[in-house]
Amino acid sequence: MSTLPDVRGAPPGVRTLGDADALSHLDSVIDTSGLPAPVHEPLAIGLRRRLFTLEVRWQFPLAVYLLSRVLYLMVALADTVRPGVVFLKTLYAWDGHWYAQLAVHGYPNHVVAGGWSTLGFFPLYSIAMWTTGELTGLPYFYAGLLVSLVTGATATVLIARLAQRWWGNAHTTRRAVLFFCVFPGSIVFSMDYTEGLLLTLIAGCLLALEDRRWLLAGLLAGLSTAVGPVAVAIIPACALATVPELRRATGTAGRRVLQTLRPLLAPALAPLGILAFGGYLWVHTGTPFATFVAQHDAWHEHSSPFALAFDAYHLVAQVLAFHSFAHPSIDLNLVSGLAGTVFLGWGLLHLWRSRALVPAPALAWTGGVALLTVTSDNVPPNPRMLLCAFPLLLAVAARLQGAAYRRLIFTSSCLLVGMSLLAFAGNSPRP
């Protein structure tokens, strides 16, 4: 039988073991024996590869994602045995409450001095929540959960496609998808949180950049910057994607000029969401920075190069002041953030070692998210932020094999259950 077409990251004519096993299984269900050899061999290869690609792109990612949602549902139900824990409230706790309030009441027309308000949150997720609620008749917090579940699934499928492109190996793609779905931060796909929508737009943008579909990439990036402030990391990623295109451009006349300028659509459109939101706030409240004022005053959010050092200082002080398990005084968010920092450094190391396979825009996105979270006083590298930096999760899963990978999945699954029980209780740590 002829060898398969070249796989990205493998020498010509070489198949990975995972691909060979899957394709040999498909051989047994595809009967081409009645066709002449010059016809049936290329046909069989093409059909087998097509079926295999569909399985990797859709069936496996969706199956793993759905199973992970069942696991989260079981954890949430188990947590309701604790006094005072109501199942439905666990689904729209924390930020979910504010997104539902934003869907119902919108933004106030002035900055609430020193007080909490919906001004602290970007609009696109709540717009999707409101639209889904109006179309389905569901209460807004249920509509938001539906948005999270569906966009979590689309994000998983798109991220699986990225992993398949980067490593060109179906076995590696499966490992990456499994780790992504059981990573503790993926709890937010089962709550009223924005990450499903955000990662769908970001993964779609990275795919469009790889396909040189500049307008689509710019529109997706522009929408993402209306979801949350972390999305600004996609702007330099889009800009970086245009560099090789501009280098290849030659000549200055007519059609060539248009071809040269077309890649600039992506970085030009990328900030559209945050600029539109700022313009709205300027008209509505009198300042384009109303959301940042609200975050700073009410949530005490600001950036500092010493943010992690302050977290470490506060954690040590709390440990030294600890007296009794009956009255715990240790903030688990600090523990989560500092442990996440260690994982972030480890993951970035694996991602750097995979830089020959992972495109520059994905590296830039991950680096931007890492920079934003390590300098944030309120949102350190917790599991939710690490989930946003998904290329490093894929790199870790791709590079670890055998017993090391099994330990990774076991540890992640245990953290998933333990941290989810604490988060669903509505106390600490935050998702």
Image (tube, rainbow, N blue to C red):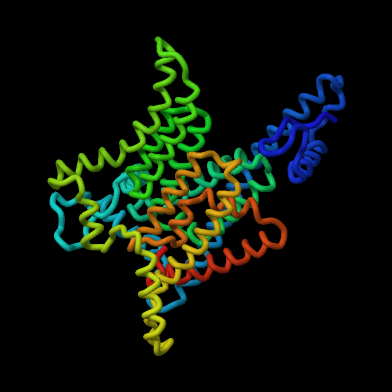
> Is residue 219 depicted above or below 62 in this figure?
above
Image quarter in which the C terminus is found: bottom left
Answer with the quarter of the image where residue 14 lies: top right
Residue depicted at x 56% and y 54%:
349
> Is residue 300 depicted above or below 275 in this figure?
below
Answer with the quarter of the image where residue 118 lies: bottom left
Task: State the image coordinates of residue 394 (x, y, percent, origin top left).
Answer: 57, 50
Picture mark count: 0
Residue depicted at x 81% and y 23%:
40
> Is residue 317 depicted above or below 239 in this figure?
below
Q: Nearer the viewer, residue 16 or 93?
A: 16
Does residue 209 appear left or right of residue 275 in this picture? Answer: right
Q: Nearer the viewer, residue 106 or 233?
A: 233
Image quarter in which the N terminus is found: top right
Answer with the quarter of the image where residue 234 lies: top left
Task: State the image coordinates of residue 71 (x, y, percent, origin top left).
Answer: 55, 62
Residue depicted at x 37% and y 51%:
144
Residue depicted at x 62% and y 62%:
408
Does residue 413 appear left or right of residue 121 in this picture? Answer: right
Task: State the image coordinates of residue 280 (x, y, percent, origin top left).
Answer: 20, 41
Task: State the image coordinates of residue 169 (x, y, percent, origin top left).
Answer: 68, 42
